[in-house]
Image (spheres, rainbow, N blue to C red):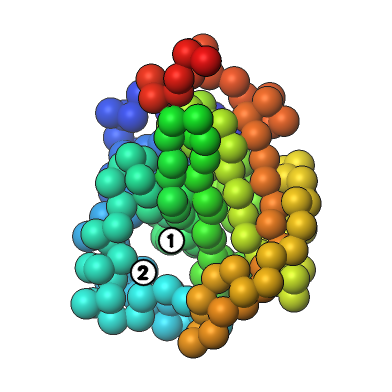
Amino acid sequence: MIENSGTEESRQTDGAPGVDLGRSPRVVLRRITSHDQDEFLERVRATAGLNLPATPEAFQTFLGRFDEGRSAEGLLICLRDTGAIAGNININSIIRGRFQNGSLGYAAFAPYAGRGYMSEGLGLVLRHALDGLRLHRLEAQISPENKASIRLVQRYGFRYEGYSPDLLFIDGAWRGHDRWALTNDMHGIVPDAPHPTLPDR
């Protein structure tokens, strides 16, 4: 079950700072802030194979990309009982107008990977993105070898849209990725009114 926090002004009281954007039985969704730097970097360093910032300077650059959903949103999945950061989900490359689309990027952190926290967190992110931000569509570009990430998006009904060679620049090379996508009507979340940037026709 996913609980809606009601308003974005409501404050989380379960141990993590910041605005509560939604909660499930075990996790809370909130925006990343500068106060998260030390714990975030600790989690990244403890988790192998992540393409996330690992130094204070890189973290500050990373944080500067996010503008509360206008063009990108940086979100954290935190344990509800302790506030510990279990994972990171970003909504990148938000495009309005006729597209109303965002691109997801996510990572589970050690020692919390494999316990279902990211699955609960993704459910919260989908509600926030499709209802709160009023996006029509979310994409996820996933390496074909990343079976865990593919299973995660499949669990929420993302459809496979094909393979794109040389799609993303990762670890010094252009790499092919599978493209997965979900629209708000596929997920059963259609906002009362479209985003104001959507044309009338």
According to the picture, the residue beneath numbered tag 1 turns out to be 85
Task: Name which quarter of the figure residue 90 lies in.
Answer: bottom left
Q: Which residue is at a point 35% across and 45% down the rendered structure image?
A: 71
Q: Which residue appears farthest toward the bottom when viewing the image?
A: 172
Task: Name which quarter of the figure residue 141 lies in.
Answer: bottom right
In terms of secondary structure, where does tag 1 sit?
A: strand
According to the picture, the residue beneath numbered tag 2 turns out to be 40
Q: Where is residue 88 in the image (x, y as percent from the top left)?
A: 47, 59
Residue 184 appears left or right of 31: right
Q: Which residue is at a point 49% across and 87% down the rendered structure image?
A: 172
Q: Which mark is residue 108?
A: none
| Amino acid found under the numbered disc labelled 1 | Ile
Mark 1 burial class by Cα count in 10 Å: few <14, some 14-19, many 20+: many
- Measured along the vertical axis of the image, is residue 3 above or below residue 52? above
Q: Earlier in the sequence, mark 2 or mark 1?
A: 2
Please indicate, yes or no, whether residue 166 appears anywhere in the rendered image. yes
Query: Which of the pair 101/20 is nearer the observer?
Result: 101
- Measured along the vertical axis of the image, is residue 57 above or below residue 178? below
Residue 172 appears left or right of 9: right
| Amino acid found under the numbered disc labelled 2 | Phe
Q: Which residue is at a point 43% across and 51% down the rendered structure image?
A: 93
Q: Position of residue 150 (x, y in %)?
A: 74, 60
